[in-house]
Amino acid sequence: MVSKIQESDVGVWKNTVTGVGLGRKLFTYEEGGSLYSTSAKYGTFKQLGEGYNTRLLLADGTDEGLLYAIEESGTLYQIDPTSGEWEQIGEDGAWADVVAADAADGTVYYVDDEGSLFAMPVDGGDATELGEGYDTAALFFWQGYVYVLENDGSLYKVDAESGEWELFGAEGAYDDTLAATIHQGVFYAVEEDGSLGATTLEDGSYEELTGADLSDIRHLFSASGNLYGIDNAGTLQRIAL
């Protein structure tokens, strides 16, 4: 049975625009331009930067690694999650056409506004096109594959080297998804009816998890071995599975 455990005062996270989990911390960009690092275990936080206008926040790694921020201007920044140092990568506005992205092993995987999927090394190498014809809502990387969640609710599994793809689950299976993430090899999706869909990425097996009503969850994160969500009231919830 799924349960929700309140991890913050009500409304503390109400200004969160986007965020990711990395290691034992949650990293969130807030309205007003500030990036915060919050201990998933203790709830202590610190500000890592301000004056930004971030659209997408990416984590390159699960236990440790770097953060990347794609700004509304289309400029990409690399962020040290410990010091908070921001470093611009590439030219101003070079990522303006990106609609969804994730990062792994020094590469940003993204779908642009024309529906093409690319792999771009952040060290300045050339982008590799992995496919086209996508209409993407969200994108996730896990163990050599890019999982592309389309606006029609279909989930595709794409080989990050060859671009070969397969429909993962039924067509449109996630058309009621409110928030999603990959946690410990499982694709979790909060559905409009408040249930939590769990798809094991190794074999594609699916299970609907019920219990607590999750229909108010708008952000979903994996951090410190747990699943977290931010609800519509701006409260951080730990989702116990």
Image (spheres, helix red, strand yellow):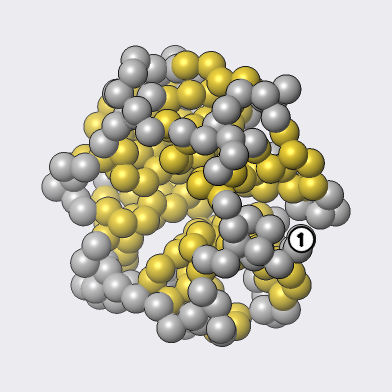
Q: Nearer the viewer, residue 216 or 166?
A: 216
- The answer to whether residue 61 of the structure is visible from this angle is no
Q: Report how many numbered discs are placed on residues in the image.
A: 1
Query: Which amino acid lies under the numbered mark 1 shown in the image of this protein?
Result: Gly
Q: Nearer the viewer, residue 220 or 127?
A: 220
Which image quarter is the C terminus in? top right
Q: From what the image shows, is residue 116 above or below residue 89?
A: below
Which element is circle 1 on? loop
Q: Is residue 49 left or right of residue 130?
A: left
- The answer to whether residue 174 of the structure is visible from this angle is yes
Which residue in the structure is indicated by mark 1? 169
Residue at the image position 32 percent from the left and 60 percent from the top:
70
Q: Is residue 148 left or right of residue 135?
A: right
Q: Is residue 45 left or right of residue 66?
A: left
Q: Nearer the viewer, residue 119 or 173?
A: 173
Residue at the image position 51 percent from the left and 74 percent from the top:
135
Residue at the image position 45 percent from the left and 40 percent from the top:
219
Q: Quadrant of residue 132?
A: bottom right
Q: From what the image shows, is residue 169 above or below residue 8?
A: below
* Few, some or many residues within 10 Å of mark 1 (<14, 14–19, 20+): some
Q: Nearer the viewer, residue 61 or 158?
A: 158
